[in-house]
Image (tube, rainbow, N blue to C red):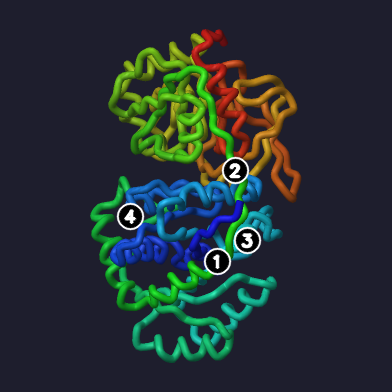
């Protein structure tokens, strides 16, 4: 079916160009104009959607052309824009940066192309003048069509705006739609996995509200809304209703240590009959009467002492999983299943002890990016030889990473073993999304509450 969705994509020439700051400010500015925006994030990022949610009060969906096929991306875009005024898609990395670092596949440009979404280019203007025009011109002409409809100049001295606007518009033919001055109060700190999460920032609401207010004065919001409304109708497939056989109680670890979840992925579990029971491994007892368990990613390495001190939960969780409770553990959750975690200071913290071995920090990124994971035997999520798309990003390494799947990077074809898989367990560093293959959610729930043994 054909649907009209006012929408725009916020992109930049590189990471650090100001996409997230501008997107957050734009969402807040639109709310100040009595609009209800629908935020989205291109790619597999967890943290940017947390900021989007902080602003709108609504979760931000990921649109990822490696994890999903184009029809699923369009359907998710439609699902989360119904009842709202316009969609704002924040891109990832550089505008054309795609799979393998040598293609445009799954890039922000590819996402805008597949969804036919007009692009607003945000460019860091510090220490540049005429060369900025050359860079913008190159981005606009590198692929035809680029989809770029306007430019925002970030970190620009207000006194330079008139001259830079005239220069860029005359040299590129693109409209400059405003600027953001270089203000420290709007900067969002970062760490090795990206931005600091909203849960850890002081005065995050005040920062975002101040930025949104400033943008009502320095950005042509009316023109940006007109660009969003100019997007063509989108073709989306119709979904059949789901019949739930039986509700399953699924424990889900959620706190500062375990905060990386795709809300769409969790919602698909709910749609298929999952009754999600949140708990904090930092503070709570282990929930009772569970049919299954999910331990998501996050920052357990920052909370080793507190996790270790919750001895009762560690004991009960270990006994439950070793007794056959179906368990999915991704990245930080996988680390939690180890016997111990070694922090950067060399301190050793006992953890759940489901898996033998330790996790320890490395001085470099161990794995980064997308990969396809082929099951080497029947497991909780996949049968032998089935392939699951996912991604990794971690600085901690395990001396027991598992070997029940074979990972393969796109483009380069690099392979390595990983993941502990069994009839009741899927535990490893990779993150995945249930909407990439909805039958994985069904398979997980079917295994839950069956009384399986390890």
How far apart, in angstroms, are the residues tagged by discs 2 and 3?
A: 31 Å
Count of labels in the image? 4
Q: Is residue 162 above or below residue 231?
A: below
Q: Which mark is residue 231?
A: 1
How far apart, in angstroms, are the residues tagged by discs 1 and 4?
A: 24 Å
Q: Name the residue located 53 percent from the left edge and 25 percent from the top edge.
A: 243
How far apart, in angstroms, are the residues tagged by discs 4 and 3?
A: 27 Å
Of callouts 4 and 2, the N-terminal one: 4
Residue sitting nearer the eye, 175 or 251 = 175
Disc 1 on helix, strand or loop? loop
Q: Is residue 378 above or below residue 226?
A: above
Q: Percent from the top left, x then y, of residue 150?
A: 51, 76
Evaluate whether residue 204 shows in this view.
yes
Q: Nearer the viewer, mark 1 or mark 4?
A: 1
Q: In this figure, which residue is indicated by the disc labeled 4?
A: 55
Residue sitting nearer the eye, 345 or 336 = 336
How far apart, in angstroms, are the residues tagged by discs 4 and 2?
A: 30 Å
Q: Name the residue located 27 percent from the left edge and 69 percent from the top edge.
A: 213
Report crowding for label 4: few under 14, some 14 to 19, many 20 or more residues within 10 A (C-alpha): many
Disc 4 on helix, strand or loop? helix
Q: In this figure, which residue is indicated by the disc labeled 3?
A: 97
Q: Nearer the viewer, mark 4 or mark 2?
A: 2
Of callouts 2 and 3, the N-terminal one: 3
Q: Name the residue located 67 percent from the left edge and 53 percent from the top edge.
A: 99
255 sits to left or right of 174: left
Single out the residue that lies furthest toward the front.
1
Q: Nearer the viewer, mark 2 or mark 3?
A: 2
Q: Quadrant of the C terminus?
A: top right
Q: Percent from the top left, x then y, of residue 375?
A: 69, 27
Q: In this figure, which residue is indicated by the disc labeled 2?
A: 238
Report crowding for label 1: few under 14, some 14 to 19, many 20 or more residues within 10 A (C-alpha): some
């Amino acid at each position: 079916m054909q649907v009209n969705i006012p929408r725009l994509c916020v992109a930049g020439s590189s990471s650090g160009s100001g996409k997230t700051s501008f997107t957050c400010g734009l969402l807040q500015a639109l709310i100040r104009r009595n609009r209800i925006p629908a935020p989205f994030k291109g790619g597999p990022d967890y943290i940017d959607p947390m900021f989007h949610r902080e602003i709108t009060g609504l979760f931000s969906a990921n649109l990822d052309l490696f994890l999903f096929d184009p029809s699923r991306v369009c359907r998710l875009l439609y699902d989360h824009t119904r009842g709202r005024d316009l969609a704002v898609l924040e891109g990832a990395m550089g505008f054309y940066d795609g799979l393998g670092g040598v293609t445009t596949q799954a890039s922000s440009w590819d996402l805008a192309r597949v969804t036919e979404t007009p692009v607003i280019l945000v460019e860091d203007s510090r220490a540049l003048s005429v060369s900025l025009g050359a860079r913008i011109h190159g981005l606009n002409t590198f692929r035809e069509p680029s989809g770029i409809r306007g430019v925002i100049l970030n970190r620009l001295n207000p006194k330079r705006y008139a001259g830079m606007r005239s220069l860029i518009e005359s040299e590129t033919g693109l409209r400059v739609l405003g600027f953001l001055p270089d203000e420290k109060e709007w900067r969002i700190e970062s760490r090795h996995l990206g931005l600091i999460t909203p849960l850890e920032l002081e005065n995050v609401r005040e920062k975002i509200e101040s930025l949104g207010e400033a943008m009502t004065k320095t950005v042509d919001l009316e023109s940006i809304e007109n660009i969003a409304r100019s997007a063509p109708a989108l073709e989306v497939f119709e979904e059949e209703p789901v019949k739930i056989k039986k509700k399953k109680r699924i424990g889900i670890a959620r706190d500062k240590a375990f905060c990386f979840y795709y809300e769409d992925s969790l919602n698909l579990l709910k749609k298929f009959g999952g009754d999600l029971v949140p708990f904090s491994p930092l503070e709570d007892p282990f929930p009772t009467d569970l049919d299954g368990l999910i331990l998501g990613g996050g920052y357990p390495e920052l909370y080793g002492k507190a996790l270790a001190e919750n001895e009762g939960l560690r004991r009960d969780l270990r006994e439950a999983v070793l007794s056959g409770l179906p368990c999915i553990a991704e990245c930080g959750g996988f680390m939690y299943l180890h016997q111990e975690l070694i922090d950067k200071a060399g301190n050793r913290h006992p953890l759940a002890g489901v898996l033998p071995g330790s996790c320890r920090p490395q001085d470099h990124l161990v794995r980064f990016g997308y990969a396809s994971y082929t099951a080497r035997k029947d497991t909780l999520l996949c049968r032998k030889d089935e392939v699951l798309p996912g991604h990794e990003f971690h600085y901690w390494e395990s001396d027991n990473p598992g070997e029940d799947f074979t990972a393969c990077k796109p483009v380069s074809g690099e392979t390595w073993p990983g993941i502990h898989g069994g009839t009741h367990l899927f535990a490893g560093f990779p993150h995945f999304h249930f909407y990439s293959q909805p039958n994985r959610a069904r398979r997980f729930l079917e295994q839950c509450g069956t009384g399986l043994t390890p």
